[in-house]
């Protein structure tokens, strides 16, 4: 016990003495959280909108003014011809071209129907889809107004049936993107820092040769491993606290659920990450190798975590792989507890899986750690 | 018997590092392993300190088998690897405390053993180990290896890269430790240090060439050896190598060590030969063979 405490003390000394390490541990994650939470958004805004109006009627002008009024669209240009508009799209000046045909107003009045042409830059398919929805919404509301203008009070016999849906957004009433992203990014930060630091830590002792000296001492495996990993476990929890504080104070993310539950889950979760880190460091000889391997897993874990893309829309085999992704469970739990106020029973499946994962990973890591070379 | 090896062999994949090494070191002996880089010295140390498992053979340290009783060995030996391997970002005192703690002891408990050495670095006890000079680092490493009062001390090239004064001091420290009953196995590539050991083993390419006391080992040298000097060293060596009766020629400080093929060697013949080759101030005198000469001869 005495030995473990001394190793922990020694590790902390080394962490706090490393002038380059402290900012990496504490400042960079905060900067990341602040920048990423504000920047990493899927909301489609400021769409570069242009149009070709060959009708030049009061109706067509009213339609354009509707786009102008929308916060999603920046009406940038009016092009006289299709050709010029297309070349502008090619150059990337605009992303949407709305083409209003001649006789737009006349057809609408006479035949009660007309068509408009819409061209959307779909290099980013998801954004193009969202843009299309926005355009349709504006066209529909224009349509409705036009209809009510067109229908004379005398024609009361003709009734138009319209179904309107009134959505109610649970858990994130204002559809605030940050509420969704902040818990996720917080998860990434805790994971990245603890994985990298623990992965590199034991390798570092290999690199500078101190591990050889320690291996000749009667120190026990568990003493060394616990002593070396405990500081990072604690650091992970400190990072979580700092992150939660920022989430609350800076982003005003609601924390509905129990903090205690979050800490309970995180404390088990970090064990998984530390186990992976230790496992990596057992099979590498330099910090550089450890860093590359950690990074490789990190990228897969992040992209398959459901943080940026929903797991439900991945192919089946990929969904199976995500079962092995610890970040997935952490993201789920954080969102469930923070935003939905989930209790112990609701997160029990994730908690159990994480606990099994932690035992398996650390077991493997301890087995593969050898005091002889 | 403090250290005992029997037919120890070790190979890395197909490269053989040690072949059939057999020797014994008595309790309280200062035993030197002398050999060039790559001779297998470090491999031997790693086997004896239980860091590496031999392919063949048995070995025991302080009465414990290196394979079966490796745990006891780790409690009873001190190991100083060739590369400085203490925590550079911890201070002198913290390093010492760290090793004392993981051996389950304290600095105070064994202070008398390290006192001689520690007083020399005590003024810098709050300095980080990475900021110490080479000689100081060696002293600290030795303190750390001694802090748990080991029965056997393994020193892998402790003086490589250390200045001559510190080297001399270091060997004096070893002599004092030896008097306290500690068995010391030390490896070095320096032949002058070999003369300070009780017994030495000459090792090359994973094989032991000879084991004996430094005094005896030079007696194995089969030939009379001569110091030769002249005004132009480079030309002298070149000429000697072309001399038809030459057996061996090695530069040795300000002289060249020369041996002749013939049993009856007349220095005047050689002086004549060298004079013909336009060398001046030629001097030839018989000298005692050194360990280096013996090693060169055996390693041929």
Image (cartoon, coloured by chain):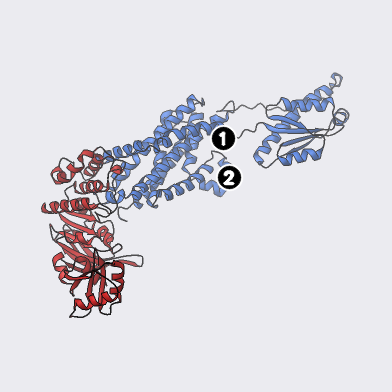
Chain colours: A blue, B red
Q: Residue at x 75, y 33 (%)?
A: A50
Side of A326 relative to A115 (left or right):
left
Where the N terminus of chain A falls, by quadrant?
Answer: top left
- Quarter of the image holding residue B106? top left
Q: Looking at the picture, do discs 2 and 1 lie on one chain?
A: yes
* Of pointers 2 and 1, the one earlier in the residue sequence: 1
| Mark 2, residue position | A314
Task: Identify residue for label 1.
Answer: A40
Query: Quick one: SS at disc 2?
Result: loop
Rendered location of residue B210, percent (x, y): 20, 69
Q: Position of residue B200 (x, y in %)?
A: 18, 63
Q: Foreground residue, A79 or A153? A: A79
x and y percentages locating residue B259 in the rendered image:
22, 74
- Judged by depth in the image, the label closer to the viewer, 2 or 1, is 1
Q: x and y percent of residue B3 in the render?
A: 17, 60
Is B272 situated above or below B255?
below
Residue A28: numbered disc: none
- Write the residue at 49% across / 32% down: A31
Chain ID, mark 2: A
Tell me if residue A255 can be seen: no
Q: Is residue A262 left or right of residue A224?
A: right
Closer to us: A72 or A15? A15
Q: Quadrant of the C terminus of chain A?
A: bottom left
Q: CA distance from mark 2 to mark 1?
A: 21 Å
Mark 1 belongs to chain: A
């Amino acid at each position: 016990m005495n030995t473990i405490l001394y190793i922990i003390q020694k590790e902390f000394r080394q962490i706090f003495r490393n002038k380059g390490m402290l900012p990496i541990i504490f400042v960079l994650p905060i900067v990341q959280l602040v920048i990423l939470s504000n920047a990493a958004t899927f909301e489609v805004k400021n769409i570069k909108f242009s149009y070709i109006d060959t009708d030049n009627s009061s109706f067509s002008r009213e339609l354009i003014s509707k786009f102008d009024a929308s916060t999603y669209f920046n009406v940038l240009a009016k092009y006289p011809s299709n050709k010029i508009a297309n070349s502008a799209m090619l150059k990337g000046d605009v992303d949407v071209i709305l083409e209003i045909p001649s006789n737009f107003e006349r057809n609408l009045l006479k035949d009660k129907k007309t068509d408009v042409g819409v061209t959307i830059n779909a290099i980013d398919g998801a954004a193009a889809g969202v843009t299309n929805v926005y355009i349709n919404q504006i066209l529909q509301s224009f349509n409705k107004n036009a209809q009510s203008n067109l229908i004379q009070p005398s024609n009361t016999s003709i009734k138009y049936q319209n179904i309107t849906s009134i959505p109610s957004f649970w858990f994130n009433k204002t559809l605030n993107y940050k509420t969704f992203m902040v818990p996720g990014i917080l998860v990434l930060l805790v994971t990245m820092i603890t994985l990298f630091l623990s992965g590199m830590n034991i390798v570092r002792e290999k690199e500078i040769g101190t591990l050889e000296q320690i291996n000749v001492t009667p120190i026990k495996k568990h003493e060394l491993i616990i002593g070396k990993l405990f500081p990072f476990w604690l650091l992970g929890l400190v990072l979580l606290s700092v992150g939660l504080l920022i989430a609350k104070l800076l982003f005003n993310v609601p924390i509905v659920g129990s903090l205690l539950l979050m800490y309970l889950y995180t404390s088990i979760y970090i064990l998984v990450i530390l186990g992976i880190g230790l496992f990596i460091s057992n099979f590498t000889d330099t910090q550089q190798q450890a860093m590359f391997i950690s990074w490789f897993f990190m990228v897969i874990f992040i992209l398959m975590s459901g943080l940026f893309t929903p797991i439900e829309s991945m192919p089946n085999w990929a969904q199976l792989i995500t079962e092995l992704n610890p970040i997935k469970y952490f993201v789920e739990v954080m969102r469930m507890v923070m935003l939905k106020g989930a209790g112990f029973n609701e997160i029990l499946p994730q908690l159990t899986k994480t606990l099994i994962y932690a035992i398996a990973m650390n077991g493997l890591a301890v087995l593969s750690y050898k005091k002889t070379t | 018997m403090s250290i005992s090896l029997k037919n120890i062999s070790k190979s890395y994949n197909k490269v053989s590092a040690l072949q059939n090494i057999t020797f014994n070191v008595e309790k309280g002996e200062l035993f030197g392993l002398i050999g060039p880089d790559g001779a297998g010295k470090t491999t031997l140390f790693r086997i004896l300190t239980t860091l590496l498992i031999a392919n063949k053979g048995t070995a025991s340290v302080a009465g414990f088998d290196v394979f079966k009783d490796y745990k006891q060995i780790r409690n009873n030996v001190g190991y100083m690897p060739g590369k400085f391997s203490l925590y550079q970002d911890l201070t002198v005192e913290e390093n010492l405390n760290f090793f004392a703690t993981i051996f389950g002891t304290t600095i105070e408990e064994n202070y008398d053993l390290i006192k001689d050495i520690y007083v020399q670095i005590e003024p810098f006890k709050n300095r980080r180990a990475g900021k110490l000079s080479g000689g100081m680092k060696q002293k600290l490493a030795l303190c750390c290896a001694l802090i748990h009062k080991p029965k056997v001390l393994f020193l892998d090239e402790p003086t490589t890269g250390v200045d001559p004064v510190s080297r001399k001091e270091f060997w004096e420290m070893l002599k004092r430790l030896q008097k306290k009953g500690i068995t010391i196995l030390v490896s070095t590539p320096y032949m002058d240090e070999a003369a300070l050991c009780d017994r030495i083993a000459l090792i090359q390419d994973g094989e032991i060439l000879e084991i004996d006391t430094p005094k005896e080992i030079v007696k194995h040298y089969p030939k009379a050896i001569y110091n030769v000097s002249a005004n132009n060293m480079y030309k002298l060596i070149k000429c000697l190598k072309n001399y038809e009766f030459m057996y061996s020629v090695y530069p040795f400080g300000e002289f060249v060590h020369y041996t002749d093929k013939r049993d009856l060697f007349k220095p005047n013949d050689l002086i004549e030969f060298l004079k013909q080759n336009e060398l001046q101030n030629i001097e030839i005198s018989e000298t005692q063979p050194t360990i280096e000469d013996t090693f060169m001869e055996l390693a041929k």
